[in-house]
Image (spheres, rainbow, N blue to C red):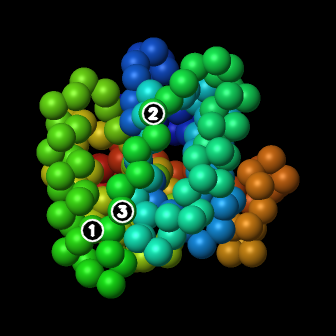
């Protein structure tokens, strides 16, 4: 279970010892794709065994930069540990395309022991975040956290995480105990 302590994002200590899968989507900027992961690494000191990046077919040219950035940040926290990166393409003009691919990933993943941390911060397609949240609820046993990086101003989405004042960011876990109790 994820918890908040004094405004910081924490996971149970056992989570830091287990492998997990970081699931995200492509956003409008490189920093939007990277900042939530960077903040998560900074606050939890954990690292995934695998990255899953859902992307629109026409955004494939951005993937090398995204993969390089994820790897660079990972190496700064856990040098010498390789993680698998799995891109999953979808047609952004067809919601069913995303649903089909996301359902297939969750079905395949449910056979794995690794837990998922799902980042819904990149906001290029609102239906993606909504559907990932729905899948997270349906597969609650396989999901450790659903994170959303909240910026004080939308202009900060294109700024690298270390250059943003900490008071201007909140890394939210939408599966926190406080939020679950309200529902």
The part of the image, by quadrant, that contains residue 39 is top right
Q: Which mark is residue 89?
A: 3
Q: Residue at x 23, y 71 (%)?
A: 97
Task: Assign a secondary structure to mark 1.
Answer: helix
Q: Which residue is mark 2?
A: 84
Q: Return the residue nearer the eye: 166 or 117.
A: 117
Mark 2 to mark 3 CA distance (whole Å): 16 Å
Q: Residue at x 35, y 56 (%)?
A: 88
The part of the image, by quadrant, that contains residue 46 is top right
The answer to whether residue 150 of the structure is visible from this angle is no
Q: Nearer the viewer, mark 2 or mark 1?
A: 2
Up/down of 130 relative to 23, above or below: below
Mark 2 to mark 1 CA distance (whole Å): 21 Å
- Image coordinates for residue 53, horizontal then vertical, percent: 44, 53
- Image coordinates for residue 16, horizontal then vertical, percent: 49, 20
Q: Which mark is residue 98?
A: 1
Mark 1 to mark 3 CA distance (whole Å): 8 Å
Could you tell me which quadrant the N terminus lies in?
top left
Earlier sequence position, callout 1 versus callout 3: 3
């Amino acid at each position: 279970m994820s918890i908040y302590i004094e405004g910081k994002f924490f996971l149970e200590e056992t989570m830091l010892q287990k492998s997990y899968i970081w699931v995200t989507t492509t956003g409008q900027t490189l920093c939007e794709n990277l900042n939530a992961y960077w903040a998560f690494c900074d606050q939890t000191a954990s690292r995934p065994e695998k990255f899953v990046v859902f992307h629109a077919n026409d955004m494939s040219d951005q993937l090398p930069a995204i993969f390089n950035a994820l790897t660079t940040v990972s190496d700064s926290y856990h040098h010498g540990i390789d993680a698998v990166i799995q891109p999953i393409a979808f047609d952004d003009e067809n919601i069913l395309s995303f649903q089909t691919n996301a359902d297939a990933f969750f079905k395949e993943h449910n056979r794995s022991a690794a837990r998922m941390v799902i980042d819904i911060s990149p906001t290029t397609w609102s239906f993606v975040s909504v559907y990932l949240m729905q899948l997270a609820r349906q597969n609650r046993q396989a999901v450790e956290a659903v994170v959303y990086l909240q910026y004080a101003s939308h202009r900060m989405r294109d700024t690298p995480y270390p250059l943003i004042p900490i008071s201007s960011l909140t890394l939210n876990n939408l599966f926190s105990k406080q939020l679950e109790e309200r529902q």
